[in-house]
Image: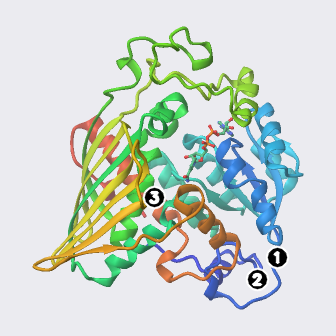
């Protein structure tokens, strides 16, 4: 089964319910213009991502097609704080079932802790509701199977919000590969660097537990594996991996519960003072007495059970092999990726944060064998995640036109990217290569 484009026409045909004029999930060119139809959206999990990617800004920008029907979070204080931050006017709930029964949304947006995505996705689909889910779609193969089965059984649609496909530089890489200039791709070298600020942040919160995030193999690397699957236009086939926890967790010489309560602040290089951030103080500190969720948790807590150092060898359906690494305590943030083709090499160094000045946000070089190196102009972008967040929202709720390969990612893309990370985690635990086809039935 290949990843499918979700055009407005297809979506309407498959879902059989929304009006042909609705821009949600539209790829600009696919539909005839008509008056927009507003759909009712409900959000589950009202932390930062819900507030700032899927919050009130959606109504401001796309109010002609978006109406907020309800917000839900298990923390009653946080859902109230989020409603104020988003500036939306809709009821709040601590029970998802009650929200769906009462406000009857057309679409559910899932922005909760990764481990709970699948339960809400399946529940929504079984109620006949379409789903937009944040990545990762799921954290293990059982969840993956239940989500895919629920989608098929209910003839509904899932969109997985892989915003990293949408920075203009990533579209450029896709176009260079499609141009065939480096010939058939034979192998890929891919290294992702998370720094001591952003990388450390995953060790402060629920992400530090495999049972909540599936580990960074899933939570973070699902983005990277989706990019590679999409860039290559191929499916992952098998994974062998290694990983360790080398910096955070039990490696620390001292620890506390969270930074605001810590007696070691003057010695700790990872001390994070959250108090000047008034939004985080309202959304997290102001609600932590209800659920004990410390947004500034200690990176050295002994219960950290994920890896901060990860390496994998992935084989693809088109015979490409990829060597991949993810390190979460680097002095800078960004990535390197190189596509080794039979007629040349496409090499990218992406800069996201580093203690030196850079001119461009990425260097892209294309060198042909027996030929010359060409430096490719990197399209400029504004906004979060290299401009990916805004472009993705425009694609989903606006009317921009894009080529077919910029399609909105579906459940298959969500599954294929998660499964690489799930296989990597399993490969470490079971000390053997894992075949993707043995994990789920697509
Ligand atoms: N695409 C991206 O670039 C991107 C960026 C950031 C986050 N995300 C994703 O968005 C999601 C949320 O991330 P975040 O940073 O906002 O996390 P967060 O911790 O700030 O928010 C999660 C919220 O879920 C709530 N919650 C916990 N358990 C719940 C349950 N069982 N039912 C309902 N609500 C529950 C928490 O109270 C919290 O409000 C994650 O899946 C994450 O992977 C994606």
Q: Are marks 2 and 3 in contact (CB under 8 Å)?
A: no
Which numbered disc, 1 or 3, marks the residue closer to the eye? 1
Estimate the spatial distance between the alpha carbons at disc 1 and disc 3, rounded to whole Å.
30 Å
Look at mark 1 in the image and give the residue it sits on.
37
Res. 417 mark: none
Circle 2 sits in a helix, a strand or a loop, which is it?
loop
Q: Quadrant of the C terminus?
A: bottom left
Q: Are marks 1 and 2 in contact (CB under 8 Å)?
A: yes
Residue sticking out furthest to the left: 370
Quarter of the view holding residue 228: bottom left
Estimate the spatial distance between the alpha carbons at disc 2 and disc 3, rounded to whole Å.
29 Å
Residue at 70%, 30% (x, y): give it. 284
Which numbered disc, 2 or 3, marks the residue closer to the eye? 2
Q: Is residue 275 left or right of residue 432?
A: right
Res. 415 mark: 3
The disc, 2 or 3, on the residue closer to the chain's N-terminal end is 2
Quarter of the view holding residue 337: bottom left
Residue 432 at least partly seen: yes
x, y (%) of residue 377? 39, 73
The disc, 1 or 3, on the residue closer to the chain's N-terminal end is 1
Residue sticking out furthest to the bottom: 32
Circle 1 sits in a helix, a strand or a loop, which is it?
loop
x, y (%) of residue 116? 59, 42
Q: Quadrant of the N terminus?
A: bottom left
Look at mark 2 in the image and give the residue it sits on.
21
């Amino acid at each position: 089964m290949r990843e499918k484009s979700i055009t407005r026409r297809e979506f309407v045909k498959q879902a059989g319910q929304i009006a042909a004029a609705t821009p949600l999930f539209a790829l600009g060119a696919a539909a005839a213009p008509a008056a927009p139809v507003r759909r009712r959206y409900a959000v589950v999990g009202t932390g930062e991502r819900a507030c700032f990617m899927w919050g009130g800004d959606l109504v401001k920008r796309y109010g002609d097609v978006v109406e907020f029907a309800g917000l839900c979070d298990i923390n009653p204080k946080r859902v109230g704080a989020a409603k104020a931050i988003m500036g939306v006017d809709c009821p709040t709930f601590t029970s998802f079932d009650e929200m769906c029964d009462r406000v009857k949304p057309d679409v559910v947006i899932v922005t909760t802790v990764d481990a709970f995505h699948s339960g809400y996705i399946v529940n929504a689909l079984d109620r006949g509701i379409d789903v937009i889910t944040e990545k990762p779609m799921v954290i293990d193969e059982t969840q993956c199977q239940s989500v895919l089965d629920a989608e098929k059984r209910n003839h509904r649609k899932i969109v997985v919000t892989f915003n990293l496909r949408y920075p203009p530089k990533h579209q450029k890489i896709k176009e260079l590969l499609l141009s065939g200039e480096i010939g058939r791709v034979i192998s890929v070298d891919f290294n992702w660097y998370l720094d001591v600020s952003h990388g450390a942040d995953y060790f402060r919160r629920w992400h530090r537990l495999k049972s909540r995030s599936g580990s960074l193999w899933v939570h973070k690397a699902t983005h990277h594996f989706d990019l590679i699957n999409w860039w290559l236009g191929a499916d992952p086939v098998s994974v062998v991996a290694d990983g360790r926890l080398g910096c955070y967790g039990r490696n620390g010489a001292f620890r506390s519960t969270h930074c605001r309560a810590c007696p070691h602040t003057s010695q700790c290089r990872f001390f994070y003072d959250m108090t000047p951030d008034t939004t985080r103080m309202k959304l997290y500190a102001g609600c932590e007495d209800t659920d004990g969720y410390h947004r500034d948790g200690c990176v050295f807590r002994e219960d950290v059970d994920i890896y901060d150092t990860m390496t994998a060898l992935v084989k693809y359906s088109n015979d490409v092999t990829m060597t991949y690494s993810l390190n979460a305590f680097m002095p800078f943030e960004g990535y390197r990726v190189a596509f080794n083709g039979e007629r040349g090499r496409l090499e990218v160094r992406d800069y996201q944060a580093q203690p030196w000045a850079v001119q461009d946000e990425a260097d892209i070089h294309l060198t042909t064998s027996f030929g010359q190196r060409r430096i490719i102009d990197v399209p400029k972008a504004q906004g979060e995640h290299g401009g990916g967040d805004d472009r993705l929202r425009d694609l989903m709720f606006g009317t921009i036109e894009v080529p077919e390969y910029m399609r909105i990612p579906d459940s298959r893309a969500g599954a294929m990217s998660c499964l690489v990370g799930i296989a990597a985690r399993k490969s470490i635990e079971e000390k053997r290569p894992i075949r993707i086809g043995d994990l789920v039935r697509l």
